[in-house]
Amino acid sequence: MQAIGFSMTRIGRIFVSIAAIGGALALATAGWIAWRTWPRKLPYVKRPGPAAIYFRNGEPAIASPTSILMAEVGDYDSTLQGYLYFDFLRSQVQVDTRQAFFCSGPTPTDSNRPVIFLRVDVDMLHSTSYLGSLIAAGLIPNYSLHSWLDADLAGCRRETEKFVEEFNAPPPLLSDIPDKDLIGPVADFILFKATTDRRLLSHADPAPIVPSPEQARQLAENMIVVARFYSLPLDTFLGIGAMENNYMSVRGDLDYAVWKRRAQRGDVVIRRRRGRVLVRNYSRGMWQITRETLRYAQLLYLRDRSTRDYSALPEALRPTIFQDPDEVEPETLTTYAGLILRNLLDRFHGNITQAVGAYNGGSQKPNPDYARSVHAIGQYARRMIGDAASDTGGRSGAHEAEEVKEKLASAWHHAKT
């Protein structure tokens, strides 16, 4: 009996344990069901409603659904290219600097790259007219309108401030950046300067031909190679190319002529007098090198090749002996421009200001205004290109886009919250 009593007691304890476990499971299940089904307060997010038509100063107007109307006015292939155009656009008198933004926006594009936005009047009719005037002036290619919330604008403003801060940081020396990392940013700068040329913006006829992205990339590579070959500061070389013709090939100085002892092959003789001839001395290519300067550059090359190994240059950049300056290939013009600048630097004992001034005004009368302009462009190029090249490190556009997206995600989040 004692054994039986002991067994019953043990069985009872087992039943109690099972009941306790079952109760705990039931309680947990009930808690889970309650958590899943308990009514919650849904967050309310105000969405833009339809546009409203009203009268403003007696004129019909169409109001934006929200108090903030933004115009997307540019989407570019790289962050550097986009920022260059953003910086250019906000420098124009037609644009309020405070209303220009560079960010990914509340609904980023597929590329994840930042784009240019302008905050415009909430009256869509007024804004359409204003944006049309920017298109007519060649300042923007097109636009699309978007209604934003306050949080959207706050995030875009913070992102813009971050880009401005980064692109205005002290730039690295371009000579310290590997060539392969420079090619893309230099090509972007070339395209930017060409497409914002005043002749294009003013619809001049005939308009210079803007290089294609492939041509810009090849020119960038050629300029980097030539600058390294002659030990030239790349930013100064870029400044000269921009000052001369914004990297576009246009024949210039059509009325310029010089007297010489005798005509040579290809010369167009205007006048003859006392054993001398007056010949046309127009300039060629993006470097605006005159025919007679090219003849002089060839003499420099014949002398220089005895001490410098020109076989180190790519074949397309190696100078060849010519009789008519018009026979010189466009690629070789870049080499001759580099040789001329190298010769001037040596002549002025490394004084970059004097050498650059002489590139335009001649050795006897260097042009200081030209030198100052080249310096300003060169410094700007160094800052833009240096930041982009050191930041992207030669990465592909897709990798850059992903890194830009990740880099700014937290700033956007904090600004909106």
Image (spheres, rainbow, N blue to C red):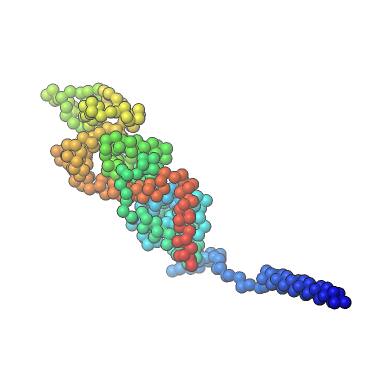
Q: Is 195 placed left or right of 71 in the picture?
A: left
Residue 32 spot, x, y in % from top left: 69, 69
Quarter of the image holding residue 5? bottom right
Residue 129 spot, x, y in % from top left: 43, 57
Q: Is 165 placed left or right of 274 in the picture?
A: right
Residue found at the far right of this picture: 1
Residue found at the far left of this picture: 274
Camera-nearest residue between 345 and 293: 345
Report how many numbered discs are placed on residues in the image: 0
Looking at the image, can residue 20 be seen?
yes
Camera-nearest residue between 417 and 193: 417
Camera-nearest residue between 378 and 130: 378
Q: Is 337 placed left or right of 366 in the picture?
A: right
**Quarter of the rendering occupied by the N terminus:** bottom right
Taking the spot 32% from the left edge, 49% from the top edge, the residue there is: 172
Quarter of the image holding residue 346? top left
Taking the spot 30% from the left edge, 47% from the top edge, the residue there is: 173
* Position above or below: 92 against 291: below
Taking the spot 21% from the left edge, 35% from the top edge, the residue there is: 343
Camera-nearest residue between 138 and 301: 301
Taking the spot 45% from the left edge, 56% from the top edge, the residue there is: 407
Residue 45 spot, x, y in % from top left: 56, 68
Looking at the image, can residue 8 be seen?
no
Q: Is 310 placed left or right of 188 in the picture?
A: left
* Position above or below: 3 against 270: below
Residue 388 spot, x, y in % from top left: 38, 49
